[in-house]
Image (cartoon, helix red, strand yellow):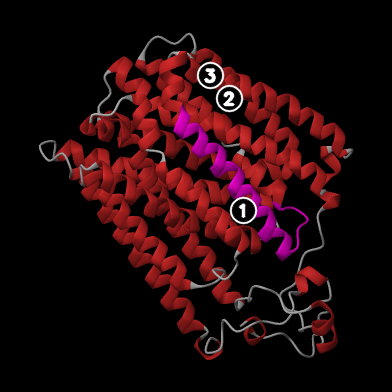
């Protein structure tokens, strides 16, 4: 089930799902603006509803996939999304389309945590770096393509394409999932027996002979307390990035209107950040020097917040394009950090994939909700929403500092040399042998 050959099929599922969901959810705001007169405030409320529902559903959906099987969760998610969007083809009111969106979000909550888990299962640390890298490049690449071409598709194919294009893709995914399930040759009820042997962090370091044989790893290990701190910091930074991202996407119809862009040109000019994020994913996939490095996470976060403010507050096309390059690159590192640290520190991949997606949902809800509230109470200040969300991002920056300070003070005696090359990754070589008389200490993971 977890062979590399089958994982190619999972990546195909991922790419198709990314294109379908990005096309529907990103251009739903343009659809609602044109058909029902939704302004920035209404679209932000719609985005907040979508994010909040996803946050509520993703974690339980990930746990369900962990318990009842990845293939079952995927088939359920694709079926719910197909049925919901089919209803959307015949919906004729704003409230009906909001309901369609809610059920589509519910179906989607079964898919992303499951895909993240299934590509991570059975991997060593080096394998996880590779799989997460491929995963990020695939979904970001197809997302960029969908965002770039979506405006032209919506204008050329008509508004109904917002529904029948994703339906056709999801039907293909449903059939491919059945085929992959049959090829796996393992019943979902027996899937738990194939779980890899849990890695114990309380192991003695490998011998010098093993180090000479296998060589030093390309990425240093962090002391366990710091590793957990990086996981928590990523779970703060990633929803913060999605606070900015979902607010920006919901406000894009307004930005395009201010800049005098058609829907097609908006798709071309306002999708630059997607390609920048794709480039960041590709670079981070092949360079692991950012692993467990606080300065990279901090630089990315500050850059992301500054770029977000520039995109929404500076009404100049050149500034918007350049700021998107910065935003996409920073968001790429933040997202990669969240997914990698979540999977690197977990054995229950489905559940942790659900947590990773749930915090994305929290960010998708919080940003637009704050923006909409600011526009509600300060309707005469057009930039009040962007300013309020920027302030929320600064609070997230403070939270990162608090988590990092607590983590480093807790292991102050063991961090002085942290970042030097560590012993070979025992998770990769399966050479870790527990020695109760000589328990491991954080120094082993500097």
Q: Residue furthest front?
A: 318
Left or right of 136 in this view: 99 = left
Pointer 1: what residue?
352
Q: CA distance from mark 2 to mark 1?
A: 23 Å
Residue 53, given in percent of the width and then of the height, sits at 46, 36
Residue 349, given in percent of the width and then of the height, sits at 68, 52
Residue 220, given in percent of the width and then of the height, sits at 63, 76
Where does the magenta region start and end? 120-149
Q: Nearer the viewer, residue 267 or 40?
A: 267
Circle 1 sits in a helix, a strand or a loop, which is it? helix
Q: CA distance from mark 1 to mark 3?
A: 28 Å
Pointer 3: what residue?
85
Q: Residue furthest left?
A: 380
Pointer 2: what residue?
81
Can the viewer see residue 359 in this picture?
no
Tag in front: 1 or 3: 3
Seen at 55% across and 32% down, the residue is 19
Q: Are discs 2 and 3 less than 8 Å apart at CB?
A: yes
């Amino acid at each position: 089930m977890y062979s590399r050959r089958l994982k190619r099929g999972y990546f195909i599922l991922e790419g198709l799902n990314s294109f379908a969901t990005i096309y529907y959810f990103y251009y739903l705001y343009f659809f609602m603006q044109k058909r029902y007169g939704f302004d920035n405030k209404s679209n932000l409320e719609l985005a907040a509803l979508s994010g909040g529902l996803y946050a509520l559903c993703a974690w339980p959906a990930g746990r369900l996939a962990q318990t009842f099987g990845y293939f079952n969760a995927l088939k359920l998610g694709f079926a719910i999304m197909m049925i919901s969007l089919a209803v959307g083809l015949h919906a004729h009111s704003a409230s009906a389309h909001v309901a369609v969106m809610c059920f589509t979000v519910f179906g989607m909550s079964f898919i992303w945590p499951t895909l993240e888990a299934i590509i991570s299962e059975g991997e060593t640390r080096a394998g996880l770096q590779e799989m997460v890298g491929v995963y990020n490049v695939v979904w970001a690449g197809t997302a960029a393509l969908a965002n770039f071409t979506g405006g032209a598709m919506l204008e050329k194919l008509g508004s109904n394409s917002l529904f029948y294009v994703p339906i056709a893709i999801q039907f293909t995914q449903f059939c491919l999932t059945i085929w992959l399930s049959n090829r796996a040759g393992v019943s979902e009820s027996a899937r738990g027996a194939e779980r890899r042997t849990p890695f114990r962090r309380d192991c003695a370091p490998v011998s010098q002979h093993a180090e000479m044989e296998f060589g030093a790893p390309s990425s240093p290990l962090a002391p366990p307390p710091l590793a957990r701190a990086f996981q928590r910091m990523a779970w703060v930074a990633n929803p913060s990035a999605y606070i900015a991202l979902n607010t920006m996407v919901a406000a894009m119809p307004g930005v395009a209107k201010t800049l005098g862009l058609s829907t097609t040109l908006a798709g071309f000019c306002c999708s630059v950040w997607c390609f920048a994020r794709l480039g960041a994913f590709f670079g981070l996939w092949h360079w692991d020097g950012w692993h467990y490095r606080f300065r990279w996470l901090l630089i990315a976060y500050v850059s992301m917040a500054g770029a977000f403010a520039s995109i929404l507050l500076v009404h100049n096309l050149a500034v918007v394009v350049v700021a998107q390059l910065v935003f996409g690159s920073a968001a790429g590192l933040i997202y990669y950090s969240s997914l990698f640290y979540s999977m690197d520190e977990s054995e229950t991949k489905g559940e942790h994939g659900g947590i990773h997606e749930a915090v994305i949902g929290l960010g998708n809800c919080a940003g637009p909700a704050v923006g909409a509230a600011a526009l509600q109470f300060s309707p005469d200040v057009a930039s009040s929403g962007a300013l309020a969300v920027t302030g929320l991002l600064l609070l997230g920056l403070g939270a990162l500092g608090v988590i990092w300070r607590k983590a480093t003070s807790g292991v102050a005696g063991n961090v002085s040399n942290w970042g030097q090359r560590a012993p070979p990754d025992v998770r990769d070589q399966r050479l870790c042998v527990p020695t109760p008389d000589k328990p491991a200490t954080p120094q082993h993971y500097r």
